Amino acid sequence: MPVTEQQQTANRLDYSIVVPAYNEESYLGEVLDILHLGMSKLPNLKGEIIVVDNNSTDQTANLAKSKGVRVIFESINQISRARNAGAREALGRNLIFVDADTKIPFELLALALKKLDHEGYGGGGATLKFDSNQNQLFFGSFLPFFWSCISHTLQLAAGSFIFCKKRLFLKVDGFSEKLFAAEELLFSSQLKKVCKKEKLRFEILTSFPVITSSRKLSWFNPFQILLAILIPVFIPWAVRSKRWCSFWYRRPIE
């Protein structure tokens, strides 16, 4: 079978960073600047950034284009679809998924790519911290710490940062488009199974946490936040409904 030009290009790229973005003009610019800076410190690796405009109504797409990254469009506002759309267009043999409101330390980017270049690793994630506790000790400080402990103990990746070999991503058919929340947890579970079959490691990296936005702590009251956390636990089927998962899609300050 003849090799297409796109396949030849893909063979020349070591990694693709996929950033799903819905109305993220306030955060995306700094996130992309940090990613560009990190990539510039890895001259021996060739990569790309793909921003998936998930039907934004603000200047997200134009901002991304001004930063010199590839921009593709996904009309259905769903995080799993946006990630999958970016992965389909990715030309790298390794994939890194980064949320549009999350800052990635260079050390983490370098470590994740080093792991993926090692034959013994298939993928993983990272622990996280909020950029501010918004003067809320429980939700702003304890909750991210608690999640990081669970993430590391159970080896489940948060959607803010996930890395994997692209061939393994394809084996698990990407993120489930039946889910409107917790899709990264299902993806982690499926990816771990594939890694185990191929005798590869799936690891949550703890040395360099990502810094993610705490904006939801100011958008929603404590009861709404607690409800969003508990609903998937006690009503698992709710993650299949966008209405029940509106906490993850609403922008109340817009």
Image (tube, helix red, strand yellow):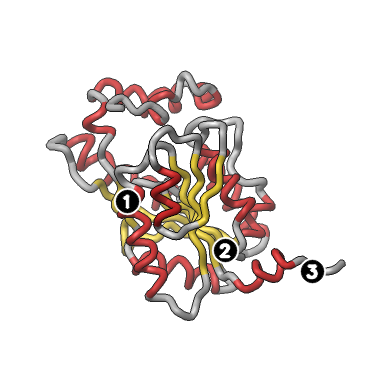
Seen at 32% across and 63% down, the residue is: 105
Q: State the separation of the CA atoms marked 2 and 3.
A: 19 Å
Q: Residues within 10 Å of mark 2 (few under 14, many from 20)?
A: many
> Which of the pair 72/97 is nearer the observer?
72
Q: Secondary structure at mark 1?
A: strand
In the image, is residue 54 above or below residue 130?
Answer: above
> What percent of the width, then of the height, locates residue 63?
39, 49
> Which of the pair 132/191 is nearer the observer?
132
Q: Say which mark, if any, is on residue 24.
A: none
Q: Amino acid at mark 1?
A: Leu
Q: Which residue is mark 3?
A: 3
Seen at 42% across and 29% down, the residue is: 249
Q: Residues within 10 Å of mark 1 (few under 14, many from 20)?
A: many
Q: Residue 248's image quarter?
A: top left
Q: Say which mark, if any, is on residue 128.
A: 1
**Which tag is nearer the camera, tag 2 or tag 3?**
3
